[in-house]
Protein backbone atom coordinates (compact mmCIF):
# COMPACT_ATOMS: atom_id res chain seq x y z
CA UNK A 1 0.00 0.00 0.00
CA UNK A 2 1.41 3.42 -1.02
CA UNK A 3 1.58 5.92 1.82
CA UNK A 4 0.11 9.36 1.16
CA UNK A 5 2.72 11.93 0.14
CA UNK A 6 3.83 14.56 2.65
CA UNK A 7 1.62 17.60 1.96
CA UNK A 8 3.46 20.09 4.18
CA UNK A 9 4.06 23.14 2.04
CA UNK A 10 1.15 22.25 -0.25
CA UNK A 11 -2.44 23.51 -0.37
CA UNK A 12 -5.47 22.08 -2.09
CA UNK A 13 -7.19 23.82 -4.98
CA UNK A 14 -10.32 24.15 -2.82
CA UNK A 15 -8.38 26.01 -0.11
CA UNK A 16 -8.14 29.20 -2.16
CA UNK A 17 -11.10 29.01 -4.54
CA UNK A 18 -12.95 32.31 -4.61
CA UNK A 19 -16.17 33.66 -6.07
CA UNK A 20 -17.21 37.28 -6.43
CA UNK A 21 -20.76 38.13 -7.46
CA UNK A 22 -21.76 41.65 -8.40
CA UNK A 23 -24.84 43.35 -9.78
CA UNK A 24 -24.20 45.14 -13.07
CA UNK A 25 -25.43 48.71 -12.65
CA UNK A 26 -26.04 51.42 -15.29
CA UNK A 27 -22.78 53.27 -14.55
CA UNK A 28 -20.89 50.14 -15.69
CA UNK A 29 -22.43 50.25 -19.17
CA UNK A 30 -21.42 51.68 -22.51
CA UNK A 31 -23.70 53.60 -24.88
CA UNK A 32 -25.18 50.34 -26.15
CA UNK A 33 -26.31 49.28 -22.68
CA UNK A 34 -23.72 46.50 -22.44
CA UNK A 35 -21.22 46.27 -19.60
CA UNK A 36 -17.77 47.70 -20.42
CA UNK A 37 -15.12 45.04 -20.89
CA UNK A 38 -12.87 47.06 -18.58
CA UNK A 39 -15.33 46.60 -15.71
CA UNK A 40 -15.24 42.84 -16.22
CA UNK A 41 -11.42 42.88 -16.44
CA UNK A 42 -11.22 44.80 -13.18
CA UNK A 43 -13.48 42.28 -11.45
CA UNK A 44 -11.45 39.40 -12.91
CA UNK A 45 -8.24 40.96 -11.60
CA UNK A 46 -9.83 41.33 -8.17
CA UNK A 47 -10.95 37.70 -7.91
CA UNK A 48 -7.57 36.51 -9.28
CA UNK A 49 -5.86 38.47 -6.51
CA UNK A 50 -8.12 37.03 -3.80
CA UNK A 51 -7.51 33.48 -4.98
CA UNK A 52 -3.75 33.86 -5.49
CA UNK A 53 -3.13 35.74 -2.23
CA UNK A 54 -5.09 33.18 -0.26
CA UNK A 55 -3.05 30.32 -1.74
CA UNK A 56 0.28 32.15 -1.48
CA UNK A 57 -0.29 33.63 1.95
CA UNK A 58 1.29 36.79 0.54
CA UNK A 59 0.49 39.87 -1.46
CA UNK A 60 0.27 38.99 -5.18
CA UNK A 61 0.56 41.07 -8.33
CA UNK A 62 -0.75 40.41 -11.82
CA UNK A 63 2.11 39.46 -14.13
CA UNK A 64 0.09 38.64 -17.25
CA UNK A 65 -3.33 37.80 -18.57
CA UNK A 66 -3.69 35.08 -21.15
CA UNK A 67 -6.42 35.98 -23.61
CA UNK A 68 -9.70 37.48 -22.56
CA UNK A 69 -12.40 36.58 -25.04
CA UNK A 70 -15.77 38.19 -24.51
CA UNK A 71 -18.05 35.34 -25.55
CA UNK A 72 -21.39 36.99 -24.81
CA UNK A 73 -22.43 40.50 -23.76
CA UNK A 74 -23.36 41.28 -20.18
CA UNK A 75 -26.44 43.44 -19.67
CA UNK A 76 -27.27 46.03 -17.04
CA UNK A 77 -29.24 44.37 -14.21
CA UNK A 78 -27.57 40.97 -14.53
CA UNK A 79 -25.63 39.31 -11.74
CA UNK A 80 -22.08 38.48 -12.73
CA UNK A 81 -20.25 35.73 -10.85
CA UNK A 82 -16.51 35.28 -11.25
CA UNK A 83 -15.18 31.93 -10.04
CA UNK A 84 -11.44 31.57 -9.56
CA UNK A 85 -9.17 28.69 -8.69
CA UNK A 86 -5.44 28.04 -8.77
CA UNK A 87 -4.74 25.84 -11.78
CA UNK A 88 -0.93 25.81 -11.69
CA UNK A 89 1.93 26.86 -9.42
CA UNK A 90 5.57 27.50 -10.17
CA UNK A 91 8.13 28.66 -7.63
CA UNK A 92 6.85 32.21 -7.13
CA UNK A 93 3.98 32.37 -9.61
CA UNK A 94 0.50 30.94 -9.86
CA UNK A 95 -1.94 30.62 -12.73
CA UNK A 96 -5.48 31.42 -11.67
CA UNK A 97 -8.27 30.21 -13.94
CA UNK A 98 -11.37 32.40 -13.96
CA UNK A 99 -14.80 31.52 -15.27
CA UNK A 100 -17.33 34.34 -15.59
CA UNK A 101 -21.05 33.75 -15.81
CA UNK A 102 -23.89 36.21 -16.05
CA UNK A 103 -27.39 35.56 -14.74
CA UNK A 104 -30.58 37.34 -15.71
CA UNK A 105 -32.44 37.40 -12.39
CA UNK A 106 -35.85 37.90 -14.04
CA UNK A 107 -35.85 34.86 -16.32
CA UNK A 108 -33.10 32.88 -14.53
CA UNK A 109 -31.08 32.40 -17.70
CA UNK A 110 -27.36 31.87 -17.16
CA UNK A 111 -24.66 32.40 -19.78
CA UNK A 112 -20.92 31.83 -19.80
CA UNK A 113 -19.35 35.16 -20.77
CA UNK A 114 -15.60 34.76 -20.22
CA UNK A 115 -12.81 32.39 -19.33
CA UNK A 116 -9.35 33.72 -18.67
CA UNK A 117 -6.06 32.82 -17.02
CA UNK A 118 -4.17 35.29 -14.84
CA UNK A 119 -0.54 34.71 -13.93
CA UNK A 120 0.09 36.15 -10.49
CA UNK A 121 3.40 36.55 -8.67
CA UNK A 122 3.64 36.37 -4.88
CA UNK A 123 5.62 39.13 -3.14
CA UNK A 124 7.18 39.14 0.31
CA UNK A 125 7.33 42.03 2.77
CA UNK A 126 10.33 43.45 0.89
CA UNK A 127 8.53 43.33 -2.48
CA UNK A 128 10.69 40.42 -3.63
CA UNK A 129 9.20 37.31 -5.28
CA UNK A 130 8.09 34.85 -2.61
CA UNK A 131 7.92 31.07 -2.89
CA UNK A 132 4.35 29.78 -3.12
CA UNK A 133 3.01 26.53 -1.67
CA UNK A 134 2.71 23.56 -3.98
CA UNK A 135 -0.68 22.41 -5.20
CA UNK A 136 -2.51 19.27 -4.14
CA UNK A 137 -4.40 17.90 -7.16
CA UNK A 138 -7.36 15.88 -5.94
CA UNK A 139 -9.17 14.85 -9.11
CA UNK A 140 -8.86 14.41 -12.88
CA UNK A 141 -10.21 17.91 -13.59
CA UNK A 142 -7.52 19.52 -11.44
CA UNK A 143 -4.82 17.38 -13.07
CA UNK A 144 -6.14 18.38 -16.53
CA UNK A 145 -6.12 22.09 -15.60
CA UNK A 146 -2.59 21.89 -14.21
CA UNK A 147 -1.25 20.19 -17.35
CA UNK A 148 -3.10 22.62 -19.66
CA UNK A 149 -1.73 25.61 -17.73
CA UNK A 150 1.80 24.24 -17.97
CA UNK A 151 1.33 23.74 -21.73
CA UNK A 152 -0.03 27.30 -22.16
CA UNK A 153 3.09 28.54 -20.34
CA UNK A 154 5.34 26.62 -22.75
CA UNK A 155 3.45 27.96 -25.77
CA UNK A 156 3.63 31.50 -24.40
CA UNK A 157 7.42 31.23 -23.95
CA UNK A 158 7.77 29.96 -27.52
CA UNK A 159 5.55 32.78 -28.79
CA UNK A 160 7.64 35.40 -26.95
CA UNK A 161 10.79 34.06 -28.64
CA UNK A 162 9.05 34.38 -32.03
CA UNK A 163 7.95 37.95 -31.28
CA UNK A 164 11.52 38.93 -30.37
CA UNK A 165 12.58 37.86 -33.87
CA UNK A 166 10.10 40.10 -35.70
CA UNK A 167 12.05 42.69 -37.64
CA UNK A 168 11.09 45.30 -40.13
CA UNK A 169 12.91 44.82 -43.47
CA UNK A 170 15.91 47.13 -43.94
CA UNK A 171 14.80 48.12 -47.44
CA UNK A 172 11.79 50.48 -47.60
CA UNK A 173 10.68 48.96 -50.91
CA UNK A 174 10.45 45.56 -49.20
CA UNK A 175 8.18 47.13 -46.57
CA UNK A 176 5.88 48.49 -49.29
CA UNK A 177 5.87 45.06 -50.92
CA UNK A 178 4.80 43.43 -47.63
CA UNK A 179 1.79 45.75 -47.50
CA UNK A 180 0.41 44.56 -50.85
CA UNK A 181 -3.16 43.35 -50.40
CA UNK A 182 -3.53 44.93 -46.96
CA UNK A 183 -6.20 47.50 -46.14
CA UNK A 184 -3.88 50.47 -45.87
CA UNK A 185 -2.54 53.29 -48.02
CA UNK A 186 1.03 54.50 -47.72
CA UNK A 187 0.75 58.27 -48.09
CA UNK A 188 4.39 59.25 -47.89
Image (tube, rainbow, N blue to C red):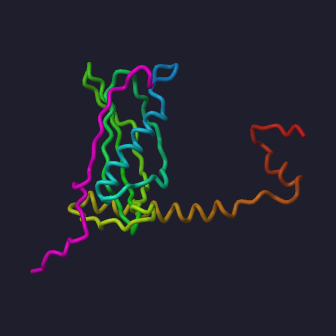
Image position, residue 68 (x, y; %): 47, 44
Q: Is residue 104 left or right of residue 65?
A: left
Looking at the rendering, which quadrant does residue 120 occupy?
bottom left
The residue sitting at 12% across, 78% down in the picture is: 3
Which residue lies at the image location 47% right of the left edge and 41% below the top edge? 69
Q: Which residues are magenta?
A: 1-28
Q: Hey, which quadrant is residue 11 in on the image?
A: bottom left
Work out whether residue 96 or residue 103 is closer to the camera in this orientation and state it.
Answer: 96
| Quadrant position of the C terminus in the picture | top right
**In front: 136, or 150?**
136
Instruction: Answer above or below: position of 176 versus 162.
Output: above
Which residue lies most toward the front here?
Answer: 126
Q: Position of residue 102 (x, y in %)?
A: 33, 31
> Considering only vertical position in the picture, is 67 above or below 91?
above
Compared with residue 168, is residue 75 higher up or lower down, i.e. above or below? above
Q: Position of residue 174 (x, y in %)?
A: 85, 55
Name the quarter where the N terminus is drawn: bottom left
Q: Nearer the viewer, residue 143 or 126?
A: 126
- Residue plotted at (49% across, 53% down): 64
Decide if residue 7 is on the left or right side of residue 132: left
Residue lying furthest bottom: 1
Amino acid sequence: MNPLPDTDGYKSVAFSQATITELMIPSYSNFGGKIHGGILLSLMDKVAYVCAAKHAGNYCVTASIDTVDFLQPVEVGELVSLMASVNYVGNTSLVVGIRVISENIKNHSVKHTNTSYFTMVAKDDFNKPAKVPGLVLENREQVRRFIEARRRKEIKQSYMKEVEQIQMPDNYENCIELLQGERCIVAG
